Image: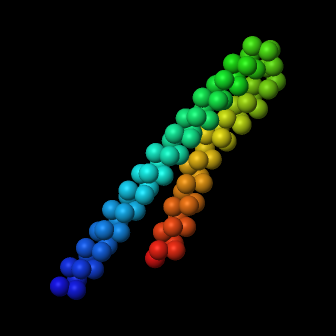
Amino acid sequence: MQDSHIQSSRVRRTVDDLVLAEMFLLQATIESATAIGSGINDLVTAVDEGEERSLGSVLQHTAGQALEPYTSRLKVFREIRQHRD
């Protein structure tokens, strides 16, 4: 009886973690897509204005902006799990 309750609790916690991780992933994906869209607009502007030297910096900035939502959500997810355990 005790083992069943412990296992049920572990399954519940695992499912909760999965749902939370999926919510963070969805939120990060939306933010990342927004950053990529902004980066594309910045690239078009740079090309239209003939700013070839800034293309690399625009790409680097866009990559950083697109990656940040994932890294920050992962950090928050780990903190939540750490405090719960």
Circle count: 0
Q: Quadrant of the N terminus?
A: bottom left
**Relative side of 40 to 80, left or right:** right
* Residue visible at 51% across and 67% down in the picture: 80
The image's colour scheme reads rainbow
* Residue 72 in which image quadrant: bottom right
Q: Considering only vertical position in the picture, is 67 above or below 38?
A: below
Q: Considering only vertical position in the picture, is 80 above or below 31?
A: below
**Relative side of 22 to 64, left or right:** left
**In the image as oriented, which residue stretches furthest toward the left?**
1
Q: Position of residue 57 (x, y in %)?
A: 76, 32
**In the image as oriented, which residue stretches furthest toward the bottom?**
2
Q: Considering only vertical position in the picture, is 44 above or below 60?
A: above
Toward the viewer: 15 or 53?
15
* Residue 47 in which image quadrant: top right
Q: Position of residue 69 (x, y in %)?
A: 59, 47
**Relative side of 14 to 53, left or right:** left
Q: Position of residue 50 (x, y in %)?
A: 80, 14
* Residue visible at 65% across and 41% down in the picture: 65
* Residue visible at 38% across and 56% down in the picture: 19
Q: Position of residue 44 (x, y in %)?
A: 69, 18
* Residue 3 in which image quadrant: bottom left
